[in-house]
Image: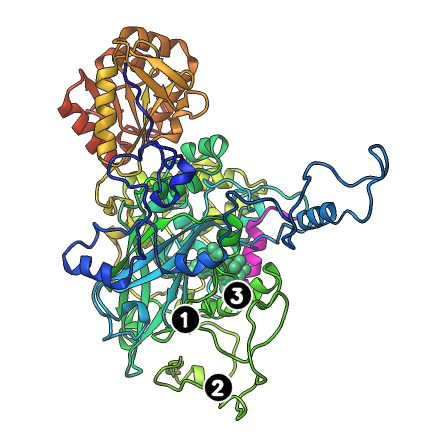
Amino acid sequence: TQAVVAAVPFNALKASEHGFDNGISPPAGQTAEPPSRMTTASTLSESYHAGKVGTVAPQGVNATIGTLDRVRVDSGGQPLTTNQGVAIADNQNSLKAGVRGPVLLEDFVLREKLTHFDHERIPERIVHARGSAAHGYFECYEPLTQFTKAAPFQESGKVTPVFVRFSTVAGERGSKDTARDVRGFAVKFYTDEGNWDLVGNNMPVFFIQDAMKFPDLVHAVKPEPHHGMPQAASAHDTFWDFVSLMPESTHMLMWVMSDRAIPRSYATMQGFGVHSYRFVNDAGESVFVKFHWEPKYGTHSLVWDEAVKISGADPDYHRRDLWERIESGVFPEWELGVQIFTEEQAQAFSFDILDATKLIPEELVPVQLVGRMVLNRNPDNFFAETEQVAFCTAHVVPGIDFSNDPLLAGRIHSYVDTQISRLGGPNFHELPINAPIAQVHNNQRDGMHRQAIPRGRVAYEPNSLGGGCPFQAGAAQGFVSVPARLEAKEAQGKVRAKPEKFADHYTQATLFLDSQTEVERAHIAAAFRFELSKVTVPAIRERMVASLLNVSEALAKTVAAGLGMANLPAPLPKALETVETPEVTVSATLSLKARPGDGSIAGRKVALLVADGVDGDSLLKIHAALLAQDAVPRFVAPHIGRVVTSDGTEIEADASLENEPGFLFDALVLPNGKAGVDALSKDGHTAEFIKDQYRHCKPILVLSGSQTLFAQAGGSDLTPSGGQDPGIFIGPFRSSTVQAFIKGIGRHRHPERETAPPR
Ligand code: HDE
């Protein structure tokens, strides 16, 4: 017999956590020894010049991790102490006046322990409370000095450490990961000229145009204030009441009702800076820039039924996925893209680039790839790093500047402001995860929780007693704001108003919809139907359909029919009847179809169903073939533990049909071996497992021995229109079939089989 050990997530830097320092060998190709030195810019730059970009990822070590070492605590082999370092003799019993007597006030050990515990929660983020983060690095491809003097873009191969946090927006800290929602995509670059936070989302536009409306938007989407429901969901009256009265949100609603709002993984989402920013070069010249993150593994989503089921079986689905990818060395990776354009170009566009509800079609301004970002290390402590990290749009470095986007203006204020109450004072920048690598020297002093010990008697400038230090850096070294040009109209005086093009609320909503495939459009209509079906006030549903009529009559009609509306309402009056002709009316790159990534199956979870008596040989070969491609094959059996195959081989099942249901996997293999298949078919979970995989359009490999099992669960290799289903692979065990199956997993999903309602 031969024992097969399941694929354990493994990080060489944390070998002890996986028991690999106890005489067990790490998986092939991995080393239990941490690298002996830090990965530096120059070592990566060598690999870049050797043409190895995209293939060399340093094993979880980077410059920020080094600076965090000073505060890392490792208690291995140490006695328990109080916060004063006094060793504790007894951690079980409080100090009493006799065994049955009262507890004494002098018990400082008990009191310290309870007091600290009583205060160990901090307020959660007002929005984006639920999130997960990782360390990594950004590597520049070619110098961008022509456009910007920002430190990360000055040399090819230059590496800048990053910490990245992904999040949902509406749900509370403990809410499910797979809610229909926007995802935050916040990147902190620890550049050698100070921290730069690019605080973006996984969608390129936003609900509102002016920061003035943000508290209203958030109050509308959060649980309703009288009863605190629903959690992590926009499907309720107040959200739809607000957005149906705010037609500027229509474009964003198209994105949020699309599958983009239910990503498969943080590693398979695009990211966007949303606003127009500025690049500024050494000569002080500036261009506009929009930032894009393009995932190496493609942009992939869940389907709604799947997202709903996952939220019950594994509310930590995205957190777990990010963690496991990094622990197992399949590092999430993105390329940074920039759309660069001038003030003159911007003025000619049919839309306003200061309006965060508009995107710039890639056909109009192409996306240039300027570097890549790799996430290669999980945090050591969730609270100290993921919870305490403070992203602020105000954190920019020389070479990056703001545009006049009025939404951005509010953000520049709000993020610093919120940290002061969330993290308990103005010194949050000293928390290790927030501290820049660049040195900090100024005359700011004191405040709650101050860590630094500034020396000397001088805390003012100008001074002569401190030799004039710290001195003002001047324009050559210091941050200089771009003297942005003011248009004549804007110079007229103070106004509370918007530029006219902001009032075109529908053109780009239609652009997005028209750029989707038929399946994607069907999902958008279904999402509107579902969300609005949860709205109890008919007038709100009608107003929303009236607004959709301005986007697409077909969409409005489908949604109205889905809501059982007898008559279509009149279209909502538009703020602007005549709009400028858009440059682009269909942008293929807005469809997920255009974003398959590199086609690899790295990180995908594949279930191989097993029970006593299955054919082991074929399954072990399939398991090995999947592992060789960095996928995560798991043996799933009626119970966890030992399964004995027909030839007596022992397989260790690390998941059961009950504890990891079918919808948690990206693909399915049904085995050969009569006794095993019979055993599986007796367990009702098997049919559910197959049904969900089938319904969610996942690739399924059906070895001949399971053909009946598959058919009994409702599976078929024909599509509803009678064609061959490209995601179903039925046949005897052959390596060509396995290869075809692997290719099918690379395609992620096979919507040809989908019907609504499901067959
Ligand atoms: Fe945020 N937002 N936001 N936001 N946002 C916060 O800051 C705010 C907006 C985004 O992982 C808060 O530290 C205002 C757009 C992300 O820690 C808060 C406005 C975009 C994160 C705040 C916006 C974002 C936040 C809550 C309109 C995409 C999570 C806690 C003017 C470009 C960062 C915190 C993390 C978090 C304010 C609009 C992205 C309250 C006032 C547009 C990714 O300060």
Question: Which residue extends farthest bottom?
Answer: 464
Label 2, residues with CA under 10 Å away: few <14, some 14-19, many ≥20: some
> Based on the displayed image, in which of its 4 quarters is residue 198 positioned?
bottom left
The magenta-colored residue range is: 213-225
From the top left corner, tell me how far across and down residue 538 is, in percent.
Answer: 56, 42
From the top left corner, tell me how far across and down residue 745 is, in percent.
Answer: 25, 33
The span from disc 1 to disc 3 (Cα, nearest Å) is 12 Å
The span from disc 1 to disc 2 (Cα, nearest Å) is 17 Å
Any part of residue 524 in sight: no
| Front in this rendered view, residue 13 or 575 | 13
User: Please, what is the three-letter code of the amino acid marked with disc 1?
Assistant: Ala
Queried whether the magenta region covers residue 214, the answer comes back as yes
User: Please, what is the three-letter code of the amino acid marked with disc 2?
Assistant: Cys
From the top left corner, tell me how far across and down residue 588 is, in percent.
Answer: 24, 51
Colour scheme shown:
rainbow
Number of marks? 3
Which of pointers 2 and 3 indicates the residue nearer the eye? 2
The span from disc 2 to disc 3 (Cα, nearest Å) is 21 Å
Q: Quadrant of the N terminus?
A: top left
Label 3, residues with CA under 10 Å away: few <14, some 14-19, many ≥20: some
Q: Are marks 1 and 3 in contact (CB under 8 Å)?
A: no
Tell me the SS state at disc 2: loop
Circle 3 sits on which residue? 430
Circle 1 sits on which residue? 438
| Front in this rendered view, residue 516 or 190 | 190
Name the disc covering residue 469, or none.
Answer: 2
Tell me the SS state at disc 1: loop
